[in-house]
Image: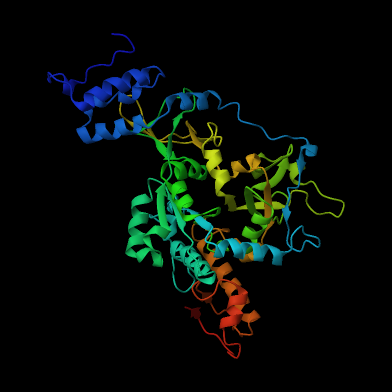
Amino acid sequence: MTKDTPPKPASDQEHSTSSPNQNRYQQLFHHLAQFGQEHVFGFWDELNDAQRNELIEQLTQLDLHSIEQLFQNSDNAPSIPTDPNSFGEPDGFALNDPRPRFTRDEAIAAGETVLRDGAVGVVLVAGGQGTRLGFSHPKGMYPIGPLSAATLFEILLTKVQAVAKRYGTSVPVYIMTSPATYDETVEFLEENKRFGFLADDLFVFCQGTMPAVDIETGKLLLSTKHSLSLSPDGHGGMLSALDHTGAFEHMCARGIKQLFYMQIDNPLVDVAAVDAIGYHVLSNAGATTMVIRKYDPLEKVGNVAVVDGKTQIVEYSDLPDEVAQLRREDGSLVLWAGNVAVHVWDVSFLRDTAATDTGLPFHYAHKKIPYVDEQGNTIQPAEPNGLKFERFIFDLLPSAQQAILVEVDRKEYFAPLKNPSGAPTDSPEAVRSQMTALHRAWLEAAGVFVAEGVTVEIQPSFASTAEEVANKVDSTTRFVQDYILK
């Protein structure tokens, strides 16, 4: 028996005719053997029909040639230059810029036009589970409202509804889930009557997955005897997912030309921000990135920078300290812009990129990945034993003909929920505190006295900006107890 000859499973030896599963098994075994991956069928004769189907379906989806190439190139990942002269500040619009190319009023006018024309959609990346938060559901279901306990989904989707109402249009939302969150997300949205969205205004789709491989051999890792170790392909997987799920066609039919991108963990996002959309349109940009001004040169955020003539985001862990600390003559940082994972994309740019053979590059992550060994035992490794592959959506920036940044105030727009209760940063308590502080500031700017220590919350259906609060709140109100405006 040669390597390319599959062993006949014991449970199939008594059958005189081949089953559909057995035929697919034979075909897949030969294909896998060409790449040295036939070991994944090591427990085939122990599996029932449902388990065999699951394994076959997973294997059928794999591009083994690409996986082999990724593994072979894992030691040749692109490196970041160490020469400070290779770095520069990207084009864009900073807060308090005395001489902007376009004024904020001009940007708002341009943004309002495309919003009223119904040319803006929103993509909400919601593939993560709340495991890190100690929450056994999709993160979007986490109750974060300081008084209302409104979920992240409710807050962000209600903001979209408020934008649509403000501009007399509809704003479709494209929600990207992962395989682990898709079913529960759909069920949750239906239970809540899609938070008022019409069926055609809420497009839920699922990102792809990538298998993990052994860090030394490139062999596919099994999580069980009948399942590969699979994980979501990163937020950059949005590009191919929009393509193969029909979302791009839906956008085309709806006349969507700009796509506002946000992630599920930040309830302070200025959803479909009219000024950012306006700057994007006026600049003829393919990509616009919202940024905050870094507190510290070594702050742990992605750095938006021009590297060798191309705008890109450099992870803080990849940026040499001497480059991070570059300063101008006035003492300000050269690389001052921190990524907050909020973008505006030109839909035609996304579609053109999705149609290319190269698309987005994969990044490599060395992880401790539980796996099933040759004897069928589940091994919990003490050290990183596997490679995971994922794509990042911000890797689109260098290929955009024009990429710009727009600075926002972190106190007003950035409160990511990442860590469990009690953590020093990005915890539920920190997020709620920042939400309350912002809403308190809106009320006080409208002439409302809020007693010290009082918790306040303003729902997006009532107001999403200080200006809207000022127009709606009775400024003669003297005192606010625990307060929620609905």
Above or below, 319 against 45 in this view is below
Residue 342 lies, in percent from the top left, at 58, 54
Left or right of 165 on screen, residue 284: right
Above or below, 486 against 220 in this view is below
Nearer to us in this view, 49 or 471: 471
Query: Which residue is painted at 46% across and 63% down in the image?
Result: 157
Residue 74 lies, in percent from the top left, at 55, 27
Query: Which residue is painted at 25% across and 31% down in the image?
Result: 52
Res. 343 in view: yes
Q: Residue furthest top?
A: 1
Picture quadrant of residue 34 = top left
Nearer to us in this view, 402 or 317: 402
Left or right of 138 on screen, residue 117: right
Looking at the rendered image, the quarter that the N terminus falls into is top left
Query: Which residue is painted at 55% across and 62% down in the image?
Result: 117
Query: Which residue is painted at 50% across and 64% down in the image?
Result: 160
Q: Residue furthest right?
A: 329
